[in-house]
Image (cartoon, helix red, strand yellow):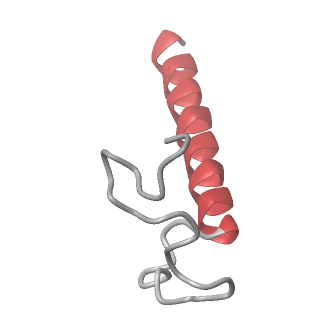
């Protein structure tokens, strides 16, 4: 919010929040680059498997 020190919707002061390098938010590791890449690989494998099954059903 321009001209204000706090957001009227969220209440957080400018510059507030966790300090840089804080790893407290990484409880499960669900959103790390590695896990995001792994989920993408799984989605790709599932799509390939579905396509293979469709080809097998047609023949």
For the point 67% across and 83% down, the residue is 20
Question: In the rendered view, does 43 fall on the left or right side of 10?
Answer: right
Residue furthest to the top: 58
Quarter of the image with the C terminus in it: top right
Q: Where's residue 22, x and y in %?
A: 59, 88
Q: Where's residue 3, x and y in %?
A: 54, 44
Question: In the rendered view, does 21 fall on the left or right side of 12?
Answer: right
Instruction: Between residue 48 and residue 52, name the one nearer to us.
Output: 48
Instruction: Between residue 6 and residue 33, name the one nearer to us.
Output: 6
Q: In this rendering, is residue 9 above or below 22?
A: above
For the point 68% across and 87% down, the residue is 21
In this figure, what is the number of numbered marks? 0
For the point 57% across and 25% down, the residue is 51
Question: In the rendered view, does 22 fall on the left or right side of 12?
Answer: right
Question: In the rendered view, does 44 fall on the left or right side of 16?
Answer: right
Instruction: Between residue 6 and residue 58, name the one nearer to us.
Output: 6
């Amino acid at each position: 919010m321009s001209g204000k020190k706090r957001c009227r919707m969220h209440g957080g002061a400018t510059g507030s929040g966790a300090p840089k390098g804080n790893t407290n938010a990484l409880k499960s590791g669900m959103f790390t680059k590695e896990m995001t890449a792994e989920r993408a690989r799984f989605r790709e494998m599932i799509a390939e498997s579905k396509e293979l099954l469709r080809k097998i059903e047609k023949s």
